[in-house]
Image: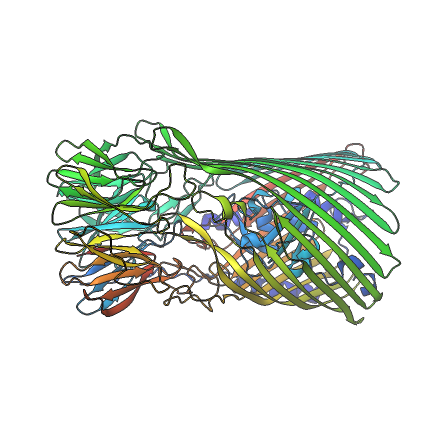
Amino acid sequence: MKPAYAALLLLVLFAPARTAAQERHAEQQPSGGLTRRVHPIPEVTVVGRRPIKETGVQRTKFDSTALKENIALSMADVLTFRSPLFVKSYGRATLSTVAFRGTSPSHTQVTWNGMRINNPMLGMTDFSMIPSYFVDDASLLHGTSSVNETGGGLGGAVKLATRPAAAEGFGLQYIQGIGSFRTFDEFLRLTYGNARWQFSTRAVYSSSPNDYKYRNRDKKENIYDEEMNIVGSYHPVERNRSGAFKDLHLLQEVYCNTGRGDRFGLNAWYIHSNRELPMLTTDYADDLAFENRQREQTFRGILSWEHLRSQWKIAARAGYIHTWTAYDYKRDVGNGTMAAMTRSRSTVDTFYGQLDGEYALGRKWLFTASLAAHQHLVESVDKNIIKQDGNKAVVGYDKGRIELSGSLSAKWRPTERFGLAAVLREEMYGTEWSPPIPALFLDGVLSRQGNLVAKASVSRNYRFPTLNDLYFLPGGNPDLRKESGWTYDAGLSFAVGKAGRYRLSGSATWFDSHVDDWIVWLPTTKGFFSPRNLKKVHAYGVEAQAELSVALAQEWKLELGGTYSWTPSINEGEPISPADRSVGKQLPYVPVHAATTTGRLTWRRWSLLYKWCWYSRRYTMSSNDVTLTGSLPPYYMNNLALEKSFSLRWADLSVKGAVNNLFDEEYLSVLSRPMPGINFEIFIAITPKWGRKN
Amino acid sequence: MRRSLRHTVLAALAALGLAGCMEWDYGGTEEFEASGAGLFVVNEGNFQYGNATLSYYDPETRQVENEVFRRANGFRLGDTAQSMTVRNGTAWVVVNNSHVIFAIDTETFVEKGRIVGFTSPRHIHFLSDRKAYVTQLWDNRIFIVDPERYAITGHIECPGMTIENGSTERMVQYGRYLYVNCWSYQNRILKIDTETDAVVGQLEVGIQPAAMVLDRYGKLWVYTDGGYEGSPYGHEAPALCRIDAETFTIEKRFGFRHGDRPGDLAINGPGDRLYWLDEGVWCMETTAERLPLRPILPGSGTLYYSLTIDPVRGDLYVADAIDYQQQGIVYRYSADGEPLDRFQAGTTPGFFCWK
């Protein structure tokens, strides 16, 4: 490591820091002054208290310390270090998609406060567009468990939600982050609340030229003599070109709890994103001569109502999403004028409605019903052309599609030790119905000692083609079939501990899924790509995770978490050509092994956080050949953060220093996309105590 | 408690020590000496992957060397290699989405120089040692370059197109005139006077003329791919046009059926037989007055993507891109259609070039 980096690292390590978010989870000792606090170890959940609604469900929940770690993080970062998912990304503020259990990004369904937010044109969700500070409740529903929430999650579902802030009176929180590459992050939250009403306004603004340096191993700069003969060459140190971003997020929430069993909510989320698309390492263009930019404005709004009674509950939600996306690829034609080579615009309007009902029959039965509708209206203009008759025209499509998804479930827990649940889901996209989607879940307590619980589930599932799959010009294929699959899960979980001393929990799940008619976009002889139902994929493996919390000594606490996944995702289709060597091979860009670890050591108001992740080799070819030009070797990533908080009479303050890519690794997550080396960010947070007691 | 704390800290430090160090092999360079005649295979790779490669095949020894650019130079060829032209012992490799043309030695594969500054280069055609034209996509200009100085020296404005729908593709020279087919959302052949660098004629031939060759009788052969269903530019059956280069008029139009997807177009060494892809490999005398009824080489589940004819032996080489995500296969047949050899090239073998 370079001396300058080492010095800066030490500076950051010893700088005092702590996020205000974690304040809520610690209690101040009455006699401990400003720098003493205790760090409670949570109690082990007793098996008999398992909610019947979660029967057999494989769920990974992210706690608030993970979501509110720092304001610069997106959900892509949280998933990278806290989950067994593979996040495919090429740096901050770039398209970040996930491979859940070896499936493709569009096989992961994402909901926000119940509303599906996958892009209906692409099917996928860009997790870099979701600031983790805007999410109060996040969980993964693995494989079959996603059928409880929605259809189409052949890999699983990511469930995101906001929650009332539980404010009493006015509250304010402001966080400023300043980091390497002239990166600035700002977060502001205003809250007001009482027993009946809760108001919250959140804003995040992030900007950076994002022009980090890296050694470009994919290029050589030549040194010429006067006769233009090459007399030397070297791998240049370049900056990440065309990587700047400016992202603004606003989130307004209003909640009303009547206290008589009715809860109302309003959530409105606005995104204004302006991002350049970074150039490849192999691009020899002058970045000043080209502009490659994507802009997005999205509004998501939801109105919700819940009516709760002791035995039953009904809920209704209505929502609307408007997304405007612009992609511009421009070229300086020589006189300083940037001429458009591609001027692509798309508008998506989605109207959403959902009704849910639950009825508990005694303590042993729970029945649920749900019906959700998403009406998408898409207008996509991809290119301007001049027709043969000289008139102008645009290449694109203008389509709408209604998507209905309904489910019924019955959950039965005859004894504390055993539970059984059945879900039947039915979906309709456009005019096409899916066959019934059944899912069966069961769980049982094998041993009260150690809270050893076994879970198993099986489900059918379908994913309909996206609107681009069907209608994109050129290449859309209206004859595509929906993908279909069977998934099986079985796993064990345990939890042991002693209140105030330690808590250890863990789980391991085996899964096996078969997906038929897997849709793949391939080039055609006409120079464009077109989707086809090509592959039959067998994805299977094991996901394991463990968490440990230990009170090491008075005022010392250690929390460790880890995940590991083994996910062979094998193409088992027919060879598409006599020479096809992809059958029996791992899908490109899906690592077979992935592991993450986080460790947090807390002492009084200090907290040291260490994060580590590892991905095995990702093949870039369907034949799994490892060539000089096309492979991505395994990599490790290490991040470190040190926090210190202060509780003053008038405000809570905290300072945090974060070091990303601690060992300054040269690494790639995606071919030809360099990732930043060691980089730093400092966060300062202030939460005034207006009208509150210290 | 103190003991457990000490153990924990020691364990954490030990784990930190294991956490770094990534496996990276950037490799060095290799020396090649490819004397004699040979065949270059330009492998496009995948768009935005930066994994284009260059293969070299010796028809005598039947040996293939893959990734020769990377191995000879120690760095990557780039993103979406499009075409290649050999002139006086130098091969000029056009790497479309890297916005560069590399000049390499045809025997050692070592870089001699590079030309940068393009919008989206497709093909290079030499007029002399000091002058060449470069066609482009997404640009209404054909660039003029000085190969000796590796510099862009000017451009030719193409009429009837903007930068957004600009597309000029293959170039064929007949005397002082150069013919260029305009492909993407276009329907014309341009005639350029190479002495004045001016467009002096245009000829409408059908929707999206994709490839063009010149036969021994001075006839230009152009195939139009017909666009695609739903295109606002129009959609028609593909066709093969015979154009008299002297008069710049269409002599005959051979229509394919709707749904046919003719691909690459090539001509043999003597210039009297045309070859093209349409699932299988098709062949026709340049004097023929109708399209053949059946291919000389039927497709058998293959995804043929490009082809060439050995200008000396007359052997046919056809590349199967398979699924475009693995190393493609090149099949070699004799002029009589006898299988002679097969070898693995790179991902998406899209262009052949003889040394």
Q: Position of residue A78 (x, y in %)?
A: 61, 51
- In which quarter of the view is residue A417 placed? bottom right
Residue B229 is left or right of residue B100, and the answer is right
Residue positioned 14% across, 54% down in the render: B272
Residue positioned 74% across, 66% down in the render: A442
Q: Quadrant of the N terminus of chain B?
A: bottom right
Q: Position of residue A33 (x, y in %)?
A: 78, 45
Residue A652 is left or right of residue A284, and the answer is right
Q: Is residue A157 above or below residue A329?
A: below
Q: Quadrant of the C terminus of chain B?
A: bottom left
Q: How many marks?
A: 0
Q: Is residue A610 above or below residue A540?
A: above
Q: Position of residue A109 (x, y in %)?
A: 61, 51
As rendered, which of B345 and B78 lies closer to the eye? Answer: B345
As rendered, which of A377 and A216 lies closer to the eye? Answer: A377
- In which quarter of the view is residue A365 placed? bottom right
As rendered, which of B238 and A625 lies closer to the eye? Answer: B238
Q: Is residue B49 above or below residue A375?
A: below
Residue A400 is left or right of residue A200, and the answer is left
Q: Is residue B242 above or below residue A41?
A: above
Residue positioned 30% across, 49% down in the render: B256
* Residue A588 shows in this picture: yes
* Residue A46 shows in this picture: no
Residue positioned 67% across, 44% down in the render: A373
Q: Position of residue A465 (x, y in %)?
A: 54, 51
Instruction: Look at the image and name its color scheme.
Output: rainbow
